[in-house]
Image: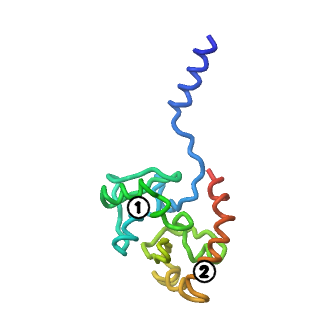
Amino acid sequence: MKLVAALLVAMAFLLAGPVRAGSFVNTIGSSEGIAIQGYDTVAFHLEKRAVKGSPEFSVAWAGATWWFASAQAKAKFEVDPDRWAPQYGGHCALGMSEGYVSKKPTSGRFDIQDGKLFLFPAGTNSPDGAYRDWGRYGGPALRIKKADENWTRFKPELEAQP
C-alpha cells in the first residue's frame, strides 16, 4: 500500500510539469523564456554579427530557451554552452560594470573580448548608447573587471527570483 501511495505522489509531480527555478539568463521581453531576444549566441562568435535564431533549433539551458540559426550552431552550443553563452547571462555588460542589471532587452549590439561575448541593449538616447559607452572611462578591460565583481552579487539574486 505504501508503495502504491508513493508511486501516485511521484506521478502527480511528473504530471504537474517541471518546477521552474529562477534563471540568471536575460529573457526580458519574452513571456516564453527565450534567451537574449532569440539571437543566436554562436553566430556572434563565428559570424561576428547578430543573427536571429529559430525555434526550430532550440536548446533548454540555464532555465531559458536558446534559439539558433542552424543545426550546426545548436550542436556547438550543446557541446559547450559556457563557451558560447554571453557573459552575465546576456544582461547588459555596461550596466553590470556600473552595478545594475538593465531591464532592457538585448539589441544585437555586442563586443567580444578574449573569446567572451558581451551584449548591450539599445540606449535611451541612441541605439548605440550602451555599446558606445562600453569603450569609455577605462575601456572594456576595466569595465569587465568591475562587471565580473558585480556579477558575483547579482547572479544569485537573479537565480532566486521565480
Amino acid type assigned to the residue bearing label 2 in the image: Arg
Amino acid type assigned to the residue bearing label 1 in the image: Gly
Could you tell me how far apart the alpha carbons at marks 2 and 1 are, in whole angstroms?
A: 26 Å
7 vs 158: above or below: above
Q: Residues within 10 Å of mark 1 (few under 14, many from 20)?
A: many
Q: Which residue position is annotated with label 1? A: 38
Which numbered tag is attached to residue 115? none
Which numbered tag is attached to residue 143? 2
Q: Residue at x 50, y 85 (%)?
A: 132
Q: Quadrant of residue 47?
A: bottom left
Comparing 134 with 125, the one in front is: 134
Q: Residue at x 66, y 64 (%)?
A: 154
Q: Residue at x 64, y 14 (%)?
A: 2
Residue reaching furthest to the top: 1
- Residue 130, position as x, y percentages in the image: 53, 80
Q: Quadrant of residue 144?
A: bottom right
Which one is earlier in the sequence, the residue at label 2 or at label 1?
Answer: 1
Q: Is residue 160 left or right of residue 56?
A: right
